[in-house]
Image (spheres, helix red, strand yellow):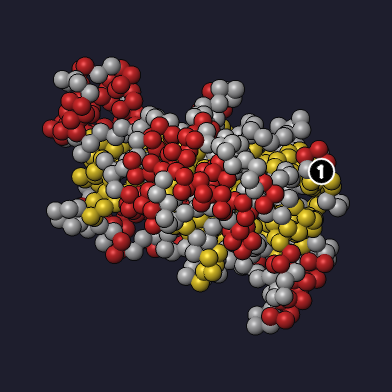
Amino acid sequence: MAYIMKKNVIHKMRSGMMLLLTLFAFHFSLFTFYSCSDEPAAENYYVFDGEMVSDFLVNRQETFSDFIAILNRSGMYGMMATYGTYTCLAPTNDAVQLYLKEHGKASVDELTKAECDTIAWNHIIKYAYFTTDLSDGNIPSANLNDRYLTFSTDSDAVTGVAAYYINKNSKLIARDDSVENGVVHTLDHVIQPNSQYLPELMAEDSTISLFNAALNLTGMCDSLYEYIDNTYSCGADSVNKGMPISTGGATYTMYYVGIRMKRYTAFVEKDEVYQKAGINNLDDLKAYAKQVYDEVYPEDAGKYDDDWTNRKNPLNRFVSYHLLPYYGAYNDWTVYGEVKTTCAHTDLIDCTDWYTTLMPGTIMKMSTPADGLFINRKGVSNRYSVKGVRVWAPSEVGNIDQQALNGIYHYIDDILTYNVQTRDVVFNDRIRIDAVTITPEFMNCGARGNMNQATGFKVIEGWDFHGHTPDLSLRQRGIWMMTYQDAVDLVGQFDISFKLPPVPENTYEVRFAYGSGEMRGVVQIYFGEKDNMQPMGIPIDLRVWGADPTIGWVADVEGDEEANQAIDKAMHNRGYMKDMDSWSQGGVNVLRAQSGKLRKILTTQTLHPDREYWVRFKLVLENPKAEFPINYFELCPKSVYAGLTAEDTH
């Protein structure tokens, strides 16, 4: 037990949690992160004795000599001898020999330098991840080849013991060997990330032939071939040399994005799902799509039925609603792991996020109750009124590689549509939009959910900076370092605007969540269509805390719901709301109980899904060091904010 405790502390520190542990070690026990019952037996671990990754490998030449040769040819062996934190996924000699045979080579000597580079980079991650850090889905950080690797589990067919896999085919035959500069996992196959584009990879999957036929007929496959944006550039120093950024009383090391990537996710029904619904061929699917979308868009019924590439064609709408311009593994769509279990009050909410799809004017709701990942679900936990469509976890898929060069696809258990029930029931709810899901750029570069560093952005596609260049970063994720899930931090003289996701036609109360602080500044907020944004009242002094009479924040009175509702109403009349009671920073500080956590009501107006609505934040006082965190937005329909029952506080 003592060793397991020690190992947990070590690998947490080596996973980028040093700051968290230093700040809060006096408040929390470091040994409560994992229960002893969750840990493999201590004898399954190698206890390091001053070895680096390089030493671990070279001291086991009989197992890793081929991989050592590849590392030396690539120049990566030296890195494995340096201090830092690394995950080394080390293939055995047998694994390398199998790889060589598959590629028609007799020995490692026949590999080119470029081939050795690729193999080495695919097997090294710059942060240490033990299997206890991982869950079904992607390892949180990309490898040195800038590819994300899928982690999944299965039951060994012979022993019945849990088996662990990387990218479905590389089994961890030894794992969690802790060394001085990270961790080593031993693999029985060389990792070979797929180099095909998403439509090409999907086309090889015979179990989704019907969706693939519709994807090709509608031409939506052509929208999934972008990868690298060659118009983007960023200096090497900005990318490789971290710079400090301070906000909210904490300082982060920020690294700028070097490459802007276009990536995609497809949620796809297998043929068997269609067959259960009586859909056996493409004509059946066309008829099904027409039935659904003629009801949702009666004004378009019959106008575009044979024009398959028209964005208003029913089949085109059907296919494009399955596609998102975000790269999202199974565990990327909301919070997960320690952040979720520590901060979210899952008795009050399911963790949810909202995403713009490739079907014009539509969004998708992602929820993670205890029983999995769901699309367009309504309710909390098992108290749902609309079940939604469940996404298959990687461990349910078998050995099928679903990760392409520029995206990923997931199986779903039911037919996914933007139907009347989705529009009028599921989305007739408070739509809480995390700032980091507003643009795909944050997820496509791996910045969202990064627990190791903050990620900086010189520019963001589709955002306007109005001549100002503040430091802009996506905050390092942690149980204390954010409000709700993540935050976009601005530091400097800022004037920034961006588009909000589309929502169904309705009358909404538009809200913005923020945290007060003495370094925040005074901000004028504008809202409206891009060329007609209007100021939302007078500028807001973000340095003023909620207890100020102009805001009227008063702590809840325990056991007196009537008094608390009166406080909420008085604040609402002033244009403010308390923050939610369903999230706790660090697991202890409920947001609603903090006078500096507020929601500002910007406007109440009817929004239309075929129009674009923008928000602009302009610092109106000169302050080159002003801090401004953008947390989340709420688009709350009238049925909720002015319904028969009071809006909940969650």
The C terminus, quarter of image: bottom right
Residue 200 x, y percent position in the rendering: 40, 32
In-image side of 632 versus 85 (left or right): right
Residue 284 x, y percent position in the rendering: 46, 48
User: Neighbour class for label 1 at 10 Å: few (<14), some, many (≥20)?
Assistant: some
User: Measured along the vertical axis of the image, is residue 208 above or below residue 199?
Assistant: below
Label 1, on which residue?
533
Q: Amino acid at mark 1?
A: Met
Where, by quadrant of the figure, is residue 407 drawn?
top left
The residue lying at 55 percent from left, 30 percent from top is 260
In-image side of 32 versus 468 (left or right): left
How many numbered callouts? 1
User: Measured along the vertical axis of the image, is residue 553 above or below residue 117?
Assistant: below
In terms of depth relative to the viewer, which is nearer, 420 or 428? 420
In-image side of 600 versus 62 (left or right): right
User: Measured along the vertical axis of the image, is residue 39 above or below residue 554?
Assistant: above
